[in-house]
Amino acid sequence: MPQGRGAPFGLYVHLPYCLHRCSYCDFNAHVRSDPPFDAMAAAILADLDGQIARFPAMAMRPCTSIFFGGGTPSLFPPDRIAFLIQGFAERLKLIPDLEITLETNPATREHGRFQSYRDAGINRMSLGVQSFDEADLRFLERLHDADQAQRAIQEAVAIFPRVSLDLMYGLPGRDLAHWQEQLRQGLATGVGHLSAYQLTVEPQTPMGRGHAAQPLALPDDDLSCDLTETTWALVDRAGLTPYELANFARPGQRCRHNLHVWRYGDYIGLGAGGHGKWGEEGKIWRRANPKSPEGYLADPHQGPWQRVLPEQGLEEALLSGLRTSEGVVRKRVQARTGLSLPLIPETLLGGGWLNERGARIAASREGWMMLDEVVVRWLVHAQEVRSRKG
């Protein structure tokens, strides 16, 4: 049965406003000259009230994390962030050791602003640096320069107990040595958490349309593998452990919110474009809010709850769980989807793509590189077994 009455959940808050939409960005981000911060904060709390009315257990189960994502959440004034956190505390059962993350753009850093966010309740800062190379930053249309990035990191490390850094590799025309230098600079900052992503050129973005007209010199498969393997090697030497495909942490520095989501736990989604998943009474539900800020402000309750079928839930649980180094746990998957894990094909175990240790199944690093194919093979094999029995 999905998620018992005492099962924890996370809270994701999407704050959609940005100073500038970068050419590669595929997130729900909107540029407005005068964002209505007060109205958006009020709509978010009204949205939460509506979701609690639909599922009253939301107010009784323990909330273990809040994650402010975007967009650029650090555009929101600290007092509005404090207002939201207080509103959540009045409506939800927040645990004492609550993780509260705020995504930040170094370009929005102002003197004293980080301390104000800390005073508001933020205890984990995630900095979207992407690169320390000026040419890279111009190509990505980031609004900060390398010096601003370094100063933002230094200030964040001095103020917040937990700081994460986002870096991006696989940029056009860049070789392995270039990425090694960017990664070394990031690791030298001493942050406790690093997210390292390969640039993905989405077709509907300005970069994607430009790539279709005049192809960019993106890395081939061999270079992509070298970039990934080099990342794992360098972070390992620096004392960070890979706990997910693109996320690395020192002891005690893992992002509890994201880890909960990857474990197929429940989370409430608020804000324009926010997504949520909720399990109750043996069923799994998903909800997606309207992406338009204006549409959300007009009616924050319009996102419908949609039922997730058990088979779909099992596929989602495998895809998200196998992204992590801990993998999937049989009892946890069954508790959250209502279905048992299917028999693993010998080709995945013998081929070294999956490892089975008791009730836990995890992908090897080779399996991580081909994760979508691994899950498809597993599910196809399960269907074939059912058909033969049927």
Image: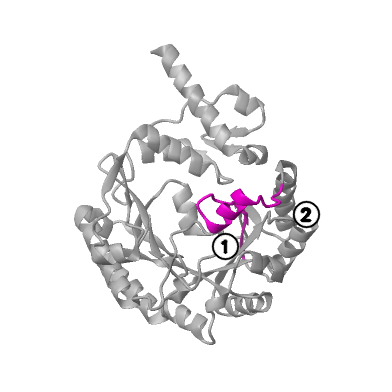
Residue shown at the point (42%, 35%) measured from the top left: 314
Residue 334 shows in the view: no
The residue indicated by pointer 1 is 253
Looking at the rendered structure, the kind of residue marked 2 is Leu
**Neighbours of disc 1 within 10 Å: few (<14), some (14-19), many (20+):** some
Find residue 389 and report its horizontal and vertical position in percent: 41, 13
Residue shown at the point (61%, 28%) measured from the top left: 348
| Magenta stretch in the rendered image | 192-219
Residue 66 shows in the view: yes
Q: Which colour scheme is used?
A: one colour
Of residues 171 and 23, the one drawn nearer to the viewer in this rendering: 23
The residue indicated by pointer 2 is 176
Q: In this view, does 345 lie to the left or right of 171?
A: left
Find residue 177 and report its horizontal and vertical position in percent: 80, 58
Label 2 vs label 1, nearer the camera:
2
Find residue 15 and report its horizontal and vertical position in percent: 40, 67
Residue 153 vertical position relative to residue 186 in the rendered view, above or below:
below
Quadrant hosting residue 106:
bottom right
- Mark linked to residue 277: none
Q: Is residue 339 left or right of residue 351?
A: left
Q: Quadrant of the N terminus?
A: top left
Residue at the far front: name it. 213
Work out whether mark 2 precedes mark 1 in sequence or the reverse, and give the earlier one.
2
Residue 256 vertical position relative to residue 390 in the rendered view, above or below:
below
> Was residue 201 drawn as part of the magenta stretch in this picture?
yes
Looking at the rendered structure, the kind of residue marked 1 is Gln
Q: Are marks 2 and 1 in contact (CB under 8 Å)?
A: no
Quadrant hosting residue 344:
top right
Residue shown at the point (47%, 17%) measured from the top left: 385
Mark 1, secondary structure of its residue: loop
Mark 2, secondary structure of its residue: helix
